[in-house]
Amino acid sequence: MTQTILTLSSDGPGLYEFTHAAEIFVQNAGVESGLLTLFCQHTSCSLTIQENADPDVQVDLQNFFERLVPDGNDASMRWMIHTAEGPDDMPAHIKAALTQTHLSVPVMNGRLALGTWQGIYLFEHRSRPHQRQVVLHLA
């Protein structure tokens, strides 16, 4: 078993791929077979496995979530109570609740068992830049 914490930088809403960092962690661990668990230590961003070949997928996902849960300044969001951290905060919590804060990826033959077009992403839901921590646990 081995663990580490990755610090990822975001500069606003969007998907930030960190597949390569996870692959390096697995390679350095020298584990041939196991399970990599990734856990995001935040409540206003999330993790996802998505296509990493066509960037339009990421744009469409971001646009979908913006339509699904608009910014707090939108008239449809006037019902919100939690607004102390700005108009993007509660919508970010909702988006994180609708997605995932942890992922599991099998390790086979010393490599992540991702599909051809799959990548691991931090899905940032806040407007400002952030430093995000993701725990990687390989067993």
Image: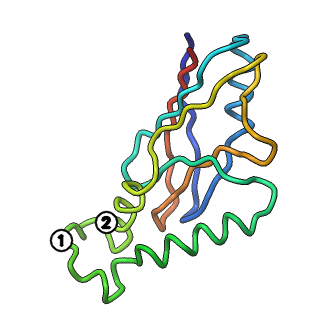
Between discs 2 and 1, the one toward the N terminus: 1
Q: Residue at x 76, y 53 (%)?
A: 52
Residue 60's spot in the image, x, y percent?
64, 72
Residue 136's spot in the image, x, y percent?
55, 27
Cβ atoms under marks 2 and 1 closer than 8 Å: yes
Q: Residue at x 32, y 71 (%)?
A: 86
User: How far apart are the two marked residues, 2 and 1, measured between alpha carbons?
Assistant: 8 Å
Residue at image mark 1: 81
Residue 137's spot in the image, x, y percent?
53, 22
The one nearer the camera, 120 or 7, is 120
The one nearer the camera, 86 or 121, is 121
Instruction: Report whether 78 appears left or right of 50.
Output: left
Q: Residue at x 35, y 62 (%)?
A: 94
- Amino acid type shown at disc 2: Met
Q: Residue at x 63, y 16 (%)?
A: 34
If the image is split into quadrants, where does the C terminus sit? top right
Q: Residues within 10 Å of mark 1 (few under 14, many from 20)?
A: few
If the image is split into quadrants, where does the N terminus sit? top right
Q: Quadrant of residue 68?
A: bottom left
Instruction: Report whether 47 appears left or right of 49.
Output: left
Residue situated furthest bottom in the rendering: 75
Location of residue 48 with respect to 139 vertically, above or below:
below
- Amino acid type shown at disc 1: Ile
The one nearer the camera, 33 or 27, is 33
Residue situated furthest left in the rendering: 81
Residue at image mark 2: 90
